[in-house]
Amino acid sequence: MWDKFYSKNGLAAKNIARVLIELEIGKRIPRVSDFCEVLSFGRGTIQSALNLLEEMKAIKLEARGHLGTFLLGKDDELLLEIAGIAPLVGSMPLPYSRKYEGLATGLVEAFESKGKRINLTFIRGGINRIESIRMKRCDFAVVSKLTAEAQILQFPNLKIFEELTHNSYVSAHKVFLSNSSETRIRQGMKIGLDIESLDQSRLTFAEVEGMDVQLVHVNYMQLFDMLHAKQIDATIWNVDEKKMIETFRAVEFQSPLARQLSLDTSEAVIVIDGNREDEIKQKWNCVTKEMILKVQALVETGEKIPRY
């Protein structure tokens, strides 16, 4: 069956599939003459292409005389495959918290609810996820608003495609202390810092500005163990990591700048290559942030099992 798509009729079917992906079920499809004008094919070719799409069960049509032909049903995933439009690939933070699991589940289910498919890959570090877009390994990246804006200054072709609202990325950042009797970062302390996390780096530099402290470079996945072993005295991290908040004392920022920056570190945004915006819009069509956030909230409260 698929060998038919190498013919002239098949080429027309691929182009028609791109149009019908965007059309809602129950709507009238363009007339054959409209397709002929836009696609530069003859009437016979267009009609054969429509028949082929029906034969593949990609669409179901109903002719209603002078009213035209209406789309009664469609298989969006099959239409995307026929049109040669691959599913979007997105890069996400490692899913170590319910919030990140909820965000990943929200993305998957929001696309599935519209008959679309999405593939997610999980990459440590917002800068690394941005790099996956620049190297064309991913179509979009989920990062904090702070990281996105900093990277856009460096790479102007990048663009924020969607902002998901405050607390969609992390609930909050705080200072975690290995010694529960401490109340803040003070002079002489060893501070754990993951330089691959732009959010943590910016917050840390703001909080310790002017202080004589030792910055210890560490992978964030080792922060818990190093705090527990008192190899570091403090670190800045988000409160969504359950074992961190349950084990160590967490205090608010002392620095006004750190408190201000933390607002933008709490918001998740979708970053894309701005040169591909039209393509991404076509694939993202009808998927809303409200769908994504609703599922994320259900996962966070335990009402929905994570699925990504």
Image: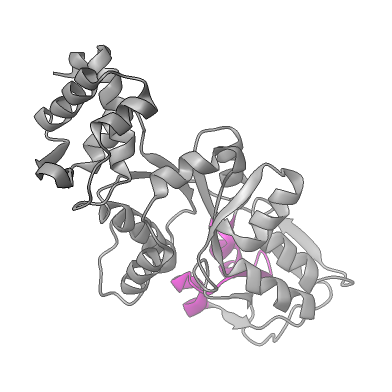
Residue 59 in the image, given as x and y percentages of width and height: 16, 38
**Residue in the image at 62% along x and 67% along y:** 265
Residue 289 in the image, given as x and y percentages of width and height: 43, 64
Q: Is residue 94 shown above or below 200?
A: above
Relative depth, front residue between 191 and 38: 38
**Would you say residue 241 sits in the magenta stretch?**
yes
Residue 149 falls in image quadrant: bottom right
Task: Read off the magenta span.
Answer: 220-247
Residue 197 in the image, given as x and y percentages of width and height: 64, 55
Q: Is residue 27 shown above or below 265?
A: above
**Would you say residue 283 sits in the magenta stretch?**
no
Q: Is residue 97 shown above or below 274?
A: below
Decide if residue 308 is on the left or right side of residue 43.
right
**Residue in the image at 12% along x and 40% along y:** 60
Residue 100 falls in image quadrant: bottom left
Q: Is residue 56 shown above or below 271?
A: above
Quadrant into which the N terminus falls: top left
